[in-house]
Structure formats: structure tokens, C-alpha cells
Image (cartoon, rainbow, N blue to C red):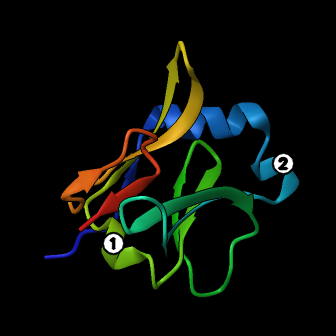
Amino acid sequence: MQLPPTVTPRAFERLAEIGAADQGQALRVAVEGGGCSGFQYEIALDAPKEDDLVLEGSGQKVVVDAISLPFLSNAVIDFSEELIGARFVIDNPNASSSCGCGTSFSM
């Protein structure tokens, strides 16, 4: 059964810190072909589109397009701060393997 992705409170808080909603923007999470493992995540600020799944929290929005949705079923979108940097990350149970950069995966 396909479940929509979820977004952690920490990810919504980071979007609020950067003022995404104030600019009419949402965090777009998409899956595209490519990368070193076959698929890659595209994460960017973008305006929501009519056919997007919209996930809302803390006055912020994360959007996923209909084509990417099956690849992100039951995934968790989070924000991570580590010594190497801060970034939005995706814990995707559908990925059979991923590369070291964390943006490329295979299914």
C-alpha cells in the first residue's frame, strides 16, 4: 500500500527559518532519473503547482509532484545538521541502495 511521504517538524521549522512561505515558496521534493545509482532527488524551493501533493506544517509547505509520489511512498523528509553541512534529507524505505552523497538511490 502506498502511503504519502511525511515531513518531520524539524524540516518544517527549517523552512520557517528561511522564510519559504513568506516568499510564496514550498520545498519541492522530486525524483528524477540519473545520479550514480539510477535515480536522484531534486530538492528546491518552488511555487506549488496544481497537481502537487501538498504536505503542510508550521505554516510551511512541502510539495511532491504526481510522478515522483510512488518513488517517495512512506518516505520521511527531514532536515539534518552535521559537521559536513546542513541539508534536507530523505529516508526512503523504497530505496534498495544509495550512494554516499545521499541524493542518489536505486530501487
Nearer mark to the viewer, of 2 and 1? 1
Say whether marks 2 and 1 touch (CB < 8 Å). Answer: no
The residue singled out by tag 2 in the image is 22
Out of 72 and 107, give the one closest to the viewer. 107
Give how far across and how far down residue 84 sits, in percent. Answer: 55, 19
Question: Label for residue 61?
Answer: none
The residue carrying pointer 2 sits among few (fewer than 14), some (14 to 19) or many (20 or more) residues within 10 Å by Cα, namely few
Location of residue 67 with respect to 61 vertically, above or below: below
The residue singled out by tag 1 in the image is 71
The quadrant the C terminus occupies is bottom left
Q: Residue at x 42, y 43 (%)?
A: 102
Q: Tell me the SS state at disc 2.
A: helix
| Separation (CA) of disc 2 from disc 1 | 29 Å
Residue kind at label 2, given as amino acid type: Asp
Give how far across and how far down residue 75 sits, in percent. Answer: 31, 56
Location of residue 103 with respect to 42 vertically, above or below: above
Please identify the residue farthest to the right as the structure is shown.
23
Q: Tell me the SS state at disc 1.
A: helix
Q: Residue at x 21, y 75 (%)?
A: 2
Please identify the residue farthest to the front as the structure is shown.
36
| 2 left or right, relative to 9 | left
Give how far across and how far down residue 82 sits, in percent. Answer: 50, 17
| 47 left or right, relative to 43 | right
Out of 48 and 39, give the one closest to the viewer. 39
The residue carrying pointer 1 sits among few (fewer than 14), some (14 to 19) or many (20 or more) residues within 10 Å by Cα, namely many
